[in-house]
Every structure is written in C-alpha cells, then in structure tokens.
Image: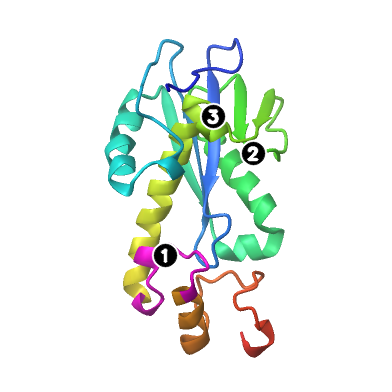
Amino acid sequence: MALILNFSDFDLECGTDEAGRGCLAGPVTAAAVVFAKDFENEIIKDSKQLSEDKRLYLKPLIESEALSFSVSHIHEHTIDKINILNASILAMHESIAKLNPEPEFIIVDGNRFKPYKKTPHQTIVKGDSKYLSIAAASILAKTSRDHYMAKIHEEFPMYNWLQNKGYPTKEHREAIKKYGVTKYHRKSFRLLPEQLKLEF
C-alpha cells in the first residue's frame, strides 16, 4: 500500500526521522525531506521494512526526486552531554535548518519534538510507516549512518560495526568486555549489564 504524501495543506511540508537512537556507539543521525505536492512513489517505505539493498537503491532516487533533503549527525560526545532524546531532536533541527527552500510545516516520526523556530509541526507515532516524506527521511538517515559506521569500522574492526552498526548485540558487548571502549562509544549508555566492571 502506498504511503500518504502530505499531512497538512502546506505546499512545503517536510518529514523528519532519525536512526541510531538505541546504539552503544556512533552518532544519532537524522534526515529531513521535502517532496513536491504531486510526488508519487509506490516503493518508498519505512527503512526498517526494507532490505539494505532496497534502501541503497532508494537513496539516490529520493535525493534526485526530493525538492530538498539533508542529513545531520550528532556525535557521541554531544549525546553524552545532552542525552539521546535531546540529541535526536537536535539532529532533526539541524537537518531541517539545512533545507532550501525552508519548510512551512514539519511532520516528525514519534511523539517527542521541540518547536523549530515558529514552524508548525505534528508528531506522528509510526509516521515512517504512514507518510512518504518521513519514510524517505528514515531511509536517508539509516543509509547515511550505516555508511558512517562502515568507515569507523575500519578503525576498530574488532567491534564489527560493519554488521551491528553499533547496536547492543551480544557480539558487540563481548567486544566491549574484551577490548574496552573507544572514542566512539556513548559513555552515558549502559554499555554492559555489569557496568561497574568497565573503566573509562
């Protein structure tokens, strides 16, 4: 089933979403996307419902078809300073700020957001499975973050970020136990169940 294009009646409506919120390492990444009012696409879906190959196929299509798009990373030191919720919202705000033209309305995946300037917004639970611009933002955020994690994997291959993308898999936690933490790990997160054994 095709997703809905717009929530509002505004011509320039932007959808925004983030990726990597629950990870132990790496940034939280957000994207923002604006499509034209007559945009149609049958295959864009929430990134979690797509294979990696399908996301990589859709990424350049979204970038070429969007009126405007942008992606922002908020890195682990900022996450540790302001917490993951605030970092996720900051990533969305930074993405929206880079859009040109500026959106007239913002739709946000989830139920938490802070006003951006004076632009009206609406939070939408499971918005990435309902609205095209949010789904497209989820794909750009996920592919961009995955690319970043593949790059830093080369620096610290023992954590296998190429596969786990920094999420708290058993393998990732075993590597933290064995090798300790890196500059990319989020020190404010519970990296191991027995946190007291970890020294920073």
Work out whether 188 lies above or below 117.
below
From this viewpoint, is residue 48 visible? yes
Going by the numbered disc 1, the residue's amino acid type is Asn
Foreground mark, 1 or 3, reads 1
Kindly identify which residue carries mark 2: 110
Q: Earlier in the sequence, mark 2 or mark 3?
A: 3
Q: Quadrant of the C terminus?
A: bottom right
Q: Which residue is under mark 1?
A: 164
Kindly indicate the quadrant of the structure image that contains residue 105. top right
Viewer-nearest residue: 142 or 91? 142
The amino acid pointed to by label 2 is Gly
Q: Nearer the viewer, residue 67 or 122?
A: 122
Q: Is residue 166 magenta?
A: yes
- Magenta residues span 157-170
Q: Nearer the viewer, mark 2 or mark 3?
A: 2
Q: Which residue is denoted by mark 3 in the rendering?
A: 15
- The spot of residue 107 in percent (x, y) is 60, 27
Query: Residue at position x 34%, y 62% from top?
Result: 150
- What amino acid is at disc 3? Gly
